[in-house]
Amino acid sequence: MGLNYYQIKKNVLQARKLVIKGTNAAGSGHPGGSFSMAEILGCLFYKHLKFDPNNPQWDDRDRLVLSKGHAAPGLFSNMAVAGYFPESELETLRKLGSKLQGHPDLKCPGVEFCGGSLGTGLSYSIGIALAGKLDSKDYHVYTIIGDGESNEGQVWEAAMTASKYKVDNLTVFLDRNFIQQDSYTERVMPLDEKLGEGDNLSEMWKDASRWKTGDKWRSFGWNVIEVDGHRVEQVDAAVKKANATKGVPTIVISRTIKGKSVEHMEDNPQWHGKAPDPDVVPIINQELDSQFMIAPSIIAGDMTNLENEVKRCAAGRADYIHLDVMDGQFVPNKTFDHAKIKELKPLTVIPFDTHLMINDPVKHVQNYVDAGSDVVTVHAEVTDESSFGEIHDLLKQNQVGVGLAINPDTEFPKWAYKFISLLDQIIVMSVVPGKSGQKYIEATHEKMARLNPILHEHNFSGYVEADGGVNLENIGSIFADGARAFVGGGAIIGQQDVRTAIKDFRYEALKSRRKQLLGKANQLGGSELVNKWIGLHVVGEKQDQIRRIAQEAGFV
Ligand code: DX5
Ligand code: ZN
């Protein structure tokens, strides 16, 4: 489909919600493994896979084989979002007569493989990949296998075979979430190093130095790419690299988190195969709707060495990199332009969030597309309905996200209402644009309160980005206002340790989100539901932290 980064994320979110809907309606199913592969499937369905939902058997389609078939709700949800059947059909999941069974079945048009008997999908994929070569077809086969599934000997026989026959029209994703049906993979059948007594299994995935799975596949003659499987941009880059690799099959070892995006499901083996209760579904949906991103602004660093600032952002695990372009006219200062962005782009795959503080953006926006921006935000003060329409069309055609920014004393303009549902991002400036290191303007809180109903009414589904003076003290309240992307200049790039600064930003936003979710539980079911919600969080320190927030808020 060729969608941009934001649209892919939106579809991934929608698919996750459908997984919750389906498994809840069924009273059973597998949310954990559906969520760990969510971004992998999203990136394939909405960017790379060639398919036609109206003609599922199209000869030249790419083949997607879900070998870890128990994650069927994840596959079906994406098929619904991609247009194979109505989203409401997820409500029939696992019901008698439905084409959406607990494991993928060929009676659902578009499903390529009856997954479920673990270990067999890779062999099948090699077969159809070789058939494609014999038939001189240029379709590609993408296969998702699980790490629990890798206990099966057949996986390794297939690994040898693919290598021997140079099956390079096959890309395998290993959904490496470290958890299988009963327990942690490293306890049942270690793929990495054997763990010692004192090892914390739920933390294991965080220590990259111990991942040896890639070496196993390399020794079988495969091209191995290792990524964070929840980063759309990394999965995207891996697919491109895999497709460009000839003569050997590729495996993308994707480090993932089982249950990703719903805190109480994350890293918790219980959620391998269990459905959420109906009373917590609205809270889960709100949680899914409240994902957030941190975007360091590099102008707060060393302007003479922006390359290094980008590297610091990448090492600090930024979600995206905020690039403040100033022209000396729209704002008094000058920073850099598209030429610099083009130079910086190859340094990382992290999305580039270009904020154009320039006059006449419609004249320049093509340059910023060509420079490699992933989203371009222009100011409402220097656009109108017609020029913004032009900008919107140009960005969308080029798979670039579309953003509109407003200055502290600009209200969201009426002419832009008709674009709201099409926007990927709205920047609400909380300082007068022009430089970093200024103080957050408190009136922005009220402005957000005025803006929210307008956005809601016009079906906004993008991110509100808070820009200017965001820090650890105020990020929680800005999150509560509805912002979901946070620019940090002085408070992130201005710090010695960018990684810790980003981590701390995330934790403060997380606390604010936890409080909102507890509020939702309280509103829906009083202290009983609050206690139930708290009780679901059993991994690590979460439960104590969340209980403390609930106590402070007087919910328990
Ligand atoms: C202001 C810029 C901001 C700014 C952020 O003109 O758009 O991105 O650099 O820096 P801090 O977080 O220091 O205000
Ligand atoms: Zn900015």
Image: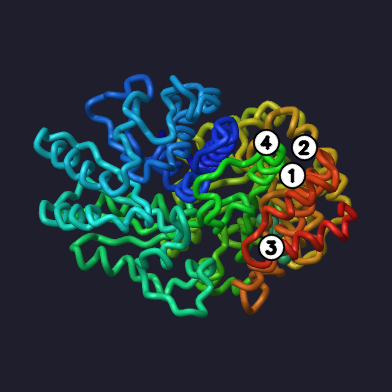
Residue at x 19%, y 41% (from the top left corner): 129
- Residue 364, percent across and down? 54, 45
Residue at x 53%, y 69% (from the top left corner): 203
Q: Which of the two marks, 1 or 3, is nearer to us in this view?
A: 3
Q: Which of the two marks, 2 or 3, is nearer to us in this view?
A: 3
Pick whichever, 183 or 521, lies toward us. 183
Q: CA distance from mark 2 to mark 3?
A: 38 Å
Residue at x 75%, y 46% (from the top left corner): 482
**Crowding near the residue tagged with mark 4, few <14, some 14–19, many ≥20 C-alpha atoms within 10 Å:** few
The numbered mark at residue 406 is 1
Residue at x 75%, y 48% (from the top left corner): 517
Q: Amino acid at mark 3?
A: Lys
Q: CA distance from mark 4 to mark 3?
A: 22 Å
Q: Amino acid at mark 2?
A: Phe
Of the image marks 2 and 4, the number of the one nearer the N terminus: 4
- Which residue corresponds to mark 2? 412
Query: In the displayed structure, would residue 79 be above or below residue 318?
Result: above
Quarter of image, res 50: top left
Q: Can see residue 155?
A: yes
Q: CA distance from mark 4 to mark 1?
A: 40 Å
Kindly state the secondary structure of the residue where label 2 is placed: loop
Q: Which of the two marks, 4 or 3, is nearer to us in this view?
A: 4
Q: CA distance from mark 2 to mark 4?
A: 38 Å
- Which residue corresponds to mark 3? 542
Query: In the displayed structure, would residue 59 be above or below residue 255?
Result: above
Q: Amino acid at mark 4?
A: Pro
470 left or right of 221 in image: right
